[in-house]
Image: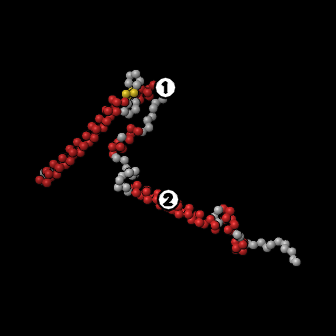
Amino acid sequence: MVRKRFQETKTGIEYLKSVDYDKYLRKVGVGKEDHYFWKQIGKALLCTYTLIGAVWVYNETSPLGWWTLKPKPKEERELAHLYDRREFPYPGDEEAMEEFVAKGGMIGTTIGPKGTVETDKDSYNFQKQLQEKKFEQEAQKLWFRMRNEVIQELQDKGYDVE
């Protein structure tokens, strides 16, 4: 009987053929007997992501208008500055405090003589001011439209108007 000494070392393709990959894959949890489990997980993920994608597309193109990512309307953009972060002066800085109070403090509030905040008066005035501004813009648009129509009519009649 011949003794076995050392096995010949396998390199390259011989080594790759001799390795039992299933043994290592079984230890990790992806062996042949685990294929059904991972197949089910894959199906579940596919269905879940398909459902989420369908809801997302419906959300974007919803005829009902629920949750859609619409651009902000003009009125909301005009009032956005009300919610901006305000810089308050340092309490010890008298000059900055006087300037802050003179400007009206926070937008929509005034600081009364006793240090109380009176919100009703200024917020109403601010809303009224916005309405007046909007009214002025509409009046100006109408005026320019009428002016351009008159100029066009005069030019059609042959008058040189510039």
**In the displayed image of the protein, which residue is found farthest to the right?**
1
Examine the rendered structure and indicate whether residue 161 appears above or below residue 104.
below
Residue 103 at least partly seen:
no
Q: Residue 68: horizontal and vertical position, in percent? A: 39, 52
**In the displayed image of the protein, which residue is found farthest to the left?**
157
Q: Which residue bears the numbered disc 2?
A: 48
Q: Residue at x 38, y 22 (%)?
A: 113
**In the displayed image of the protein, which residue is found farthest to the bottom?**
1
SS at mark 2?
helix
Q: Nearer the viewer, mark 1 or mark 2?
A: 2
Q: Which residue bears the numbered disc 1?
A: 92
Q: Residue 103: horizontal and vertical position, in percent? A: 38, 30
- Mark 2: which amino acid? Thr
SS at mark 1?
loop
Q: Residue at x 69, y 66 (%)?
A: 23
Viewed as shown, does residue 35 lie left or right of 60? right
Residue 24: quadrant of the picture: bottom right
Examine the rendered structure and indicate whether residue 42 appears above or below residue 110.
below
Taking depth in this image into account, of 118 and 54 the one nearest to the observer is: 54
Q: Residue at x 14, y 54 (%)?
A: 156
Mark identifier at residue 26: none
Within 10 Å of disc 1 (Cα), the crowding (few <14, some 14-19, many 20+) is: few
Residue 138 at least partly seen:
yes
